[in-house]
Image: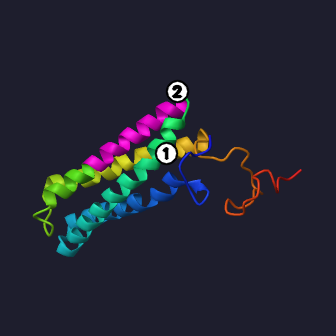
Amino acid sequence: MESHAKLLGHPAHTLLIVFPLGLLGTATLFDIIFIFNESPRLAIASFYMQVAGLIGGLVAAVPGWIDWFAIPSGTRAKRVGLAHGLGNVVVLLLFAVSVLFRWDEMEVPPTLSLVASIAGFALAGVTGWLGGELVDRLGVGVDHGAHLNAPSSLSGRSISEGRSL
């Protein structure tokens, strides 16, 4: 099933999720290091990465929902996509809780903030796997007729060109 929300010929959702995933994952890594060394700089950096990751996650959600609405009803892909999307809403909510609880205590985040960050990261691993299942196993976001010698999406040429005999 080809993506309905594209940037430069590629599914916009898969292009955009790398930013919040990287930011929120690194923020959680900084939180875990903070637990052991109590560096205020790491805690502050984690706060700002979480804020940026939340914004990026909201932006990435838009093309994800556009593509989900295009998946035919009654399919496994529709169910997996729903679990993926709703799970990611919970991920963003957990990181929002983390940000809110550390808003006035950036240098020494409260325990609940750290727990929310770690829980959000763990759940993001599950929802990321579901996203991989959608693309790699169920073909969501894959151009119809894709093959190993397909021309660049920017070439303007048909995807059927370059197909080996």
Disc 2 is placed on an element classified as loop
Seen from this angle, which residue lies furthest left?
104
How many numbered marks are there? 2
Quarter assignment of residue 34: bottom left
Callout 2 crowding tier (Cα within 10 Å): few <14, some 14–19, many ≥20: few
Q: Determine whether 137 is above or below 43 in the image.
A: above
Q: Answer yes or no: is residue 99 visible.
A: yes
Callout 1 crowding tier (Cα within 10 Å): few <14, some 14–19, many ≥20: many
Q: Residue visible at 72% across and 63% down?
A: 155
Reply yes or no: does residue 62 show up in magenta: no
What x and y, as percent, mark residue 7?
55, 58
Q: Determine whether 100 is above or below 65 in the image.
A: below
**Residue 164 appears left or right of 141:** right
Q: Residue visible at 66% across and 47% down?
A: 143
Split into 4 quadrants, where in the image is the N terminus? top right
What x and y, as percent, mark residue 45?
25, 71
Magenta-highlighted residues: 73-93
Q: Answer yes or no: is residue 130 visible.
A: no
What x and y, as percent, mark residue 11?
56, 52
What colour-coding does the image apply?
Answer: rainbow
Disc 1 is placed on an element classified as helix
Read off the residue under disc 2.
73
**Residue 85 appears left or right of 54:** right
Read off the residue under disc 1.
131
Q: Amino acid at mark 2?
A: Ser
Quarter assignment of residue 47: bottom left
Q: Residue visible at 27% across and 62% down?
A: 51
* Circle on res. 77: none
The CA distance from mark 1 to mark 2 is: 18 Å
**Residue 67 appears left or right of 60:** right
Seen from this angle, which residue lies furthest right?
165
Quarter assignment of residue 107: bottom left
